[in-house]
Image (cartoon, rainbow, N blue to C red):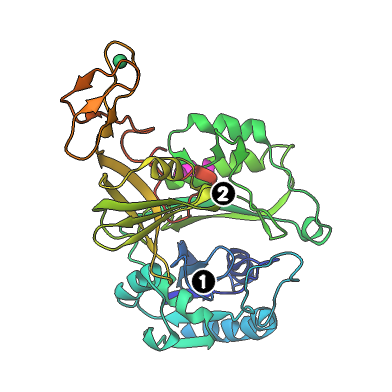
Amino acid sequence: MGWLGLDDTDHLGGGCTTYSLFELLQNLPSDYQVNNFRLVRLYPFARRRTRGNAAVAVEILGQSDEKLIDYLDQWWVQKILPLKGMVTDSSISNRTQFPADPGMVWFETQPDEATYWNCVQREVTIDEIPNAKISWGGHGKIGATAAVAWPADTFTFEAISWRQQTAIDNCIPRRVDFDRLRELDNDPNIFMSRDLRSKSVLISPRGNCPVLFGLRAKTHQSALQGCKYLIDSNDTEPVVGNVVFQTNQATDDHLLANLTATVKNVEVKKRGTVKLVCHTGETLMAFSESGDVKLLAQWLKPDDKISYNGLLSPDGAIHLERIKLVEAVPKKQRPKCNVCDVTMKSMGKGQQLRCPKCRKTSNLDWDFTERIPPFMGWVQPPKDSLRHLSKPLTG
Ligand SMILES: [Zn+2]
């Protein structure tokens, strides 16, 4: 049979592409079998990105193509097309939004993986994507095609469960058994559930979307078992269903290789955001919410050597996702008088230094001392500021 891809059914204030797929599959005629649930995150700077910038795909097996396409046609018209044009009240978000423009694609075989790599690493236009056997809708066809084209060579899993409609309609706060979630920390295959530093819970989205939680894991089994453990608790609200998706989250697929550069200039801006200019001309940005990345960037001095990785933003600056000090220039200062412990001063160009107190002179021009960085090795933003695509340095 083939692959179904879906994207852009959500908007900032509600809806969720994973839920649209779940509903579509819930109602699929029973003689079809569904495999390979996929959740694929795409280029974080895409201009028309949706809330989480995620697209979904599944493989569908069965006897009759025709009956399936009829069903998809019908579902498209009744359930997905009405989502087109949805936007959020600007009181909820100030972010520039594009109205939802859902897309759905059907491929008999997966298209070339180049489509995926383009869609995860840069902006792609609708003319660049391969033609599906059948497609519906507009801009969302790009992400939908990328989700089908994903080669899934490296992957993690996310078990997603969805809330009951009454909870969504009445904006009832999410209820998840956090004691059980804490217990799941004992499973080394489960990751990014909680940020221990900020004590924030990372599995539940903010805002009024149908997702109750998404539990991330390195294995399908841990994702499924952990998800069931949370759902089975009386302290977790009832859900309408759950699915384990294979995902490109935490794979660093959006990044190219690490680079090395020498710092030319360090400028600390509002809220501690740092702009680094390198001798090779690149501009690197460490934003205020990037935690250790920002702190290390603030500490840097001209001529320090660093390794880094990040995403090229549309304005040409690289937004740092990790950074490491390779070599720091030593701190250069005037020596101190060994009698008075006062910093000696230069008496003029090419002349000796003199102690301003006892007037003793010195032939030594400068003292060089090693600068101790706040962090050794790679640092990255705190877990709650990490991109879905970024691979955590520690589980
Ligand atoms: Zn002195």
Q: Which stretch appears magenta?
A: 221-225
Asked if 226 appears above or below 119 in the picture, the reply is above
Extreme-top residue of the structure: 339
Left or right of 17? Residue 1 is left
Quadrant where the image shows the C terminus = top left
Under circle 2, the secondary element is helix
Horizontal and vertical percent for residue 56? 50, 67
* Image quadrant in which you'd find residue 163: bottom right
Tell which quarter ligand 1 is in.
Answer: top left
Q: Which residue is mark 2?
A: 271
Q: CA distance from mark 1 to mark 2?
A: 54 Å
Q: Is residue 371 visible?
A: yes
Q: Which mark is residue 32?
A: 1
Q: Amino acid at mark 1?
A: Tyr
* Image quadrant in which you'd find residue 393: top left
In contact (CB < 8 Å): disc 1 and disc 2: no
Q: Amino acid at mark 2?
A: Arg
